Amino acid sequence: MAYINPRMDDIVSAEQTLSLLTDKKTEASRHYREFVESALDTYQESPLKAVYGGLVLGSERFIRRTLDRLDERRLESEDVPCRKALQAKNGIDDVVDRVCKELSCTRQGLTVPTNRRARNLTIYLLKRHTAARNREIGQVLGGLSYSAVAKGCQRMETQLKTDRDLVKKVMSLSGKLSRVKG
């Protein structure tokens, strides 16, 4: 982390920071002090709360670009904290939207109990292509319990062992999801 320091060889210098506030050096220090003091009496939510995968802070677009630049082989090590989040290239909405498009159904249609196969396919893909937890997946799919999500994924894995058409569908969707990176 860089701190403001009078030394010019640091990443961020005091001169650089103060020049962002005003061109007049004599007023810059006063403006900076007023800026800092104005925030002292108010609650400030930690910016670390928005850190993605314990590593990246920024907009969704920035996070996606950064993840695209990471070396996939390094992320495969079990020593990497938040590995699943860093490997995930898609958000929940990306996967659900892609499945709905491919199956010609609506998000609402995925929540209907009679559409179990589409729902289980969505669960399976969400588990494989996102960092979403079972509880989050359940909320998106109409309030399913975390155990129902786990069971739906198990059912899909069982079906994939015997249904070649389903395997092709999953491979096709997985290929398209790997290109949905923003």
Image (cartoon, grey):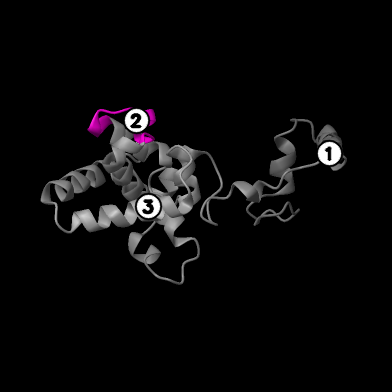
Q: Is residue 161 above or below residue 60?
A: below
In percent of the image, x 51 and y 55: which residue is there?
A: 53
Task: Please provide percent x and percent y for residue 140.
Answer: 45, 39
Instruction: Identify the residue position indicated by label 1 in the image.
Output: 42
Amino acid on which disc 3 is placed? Lys
Q: Is residue 123 above or below residue 75?
A: above
Amino acid on which disc 1 is placed? Thr
Is label 1 or label 2 in front?
Answer: 2
Q: Is residue 151 visible?
A: yes
Residues packed near mark 1 inside 10 Å, few (<14), some (14 to 19) or many (20 plus): few
Q: Measure the C-alpha gap from mark 1 to mark 3.
A: 40 Å
Q: Which residues are magenta?
A: 101-112
In the rendered structure, find residue 127 and report the number of the disc placed on it: 3
N-terminal label among 3 and 2: 2
Q: Is residue 11 above or below residue 112?
A: below
Callout 2 secondary element = helix
Q: Measure the C-alpha gap from mark 1 to mark 2.
A: 45 Å
65 vs 21, left or right, is left
Is label 1 or label 3 in front?
Answer: 3
Q: Measure the C-alpha gap from mark 3 to mark 2.
A: 19 Å
For this rendering, which residue is in front, 66 or 100? 100
Instruction: Identify the residue position indicated by label 2 in the image.
Output: 109
43 vs 165, left or right, is right
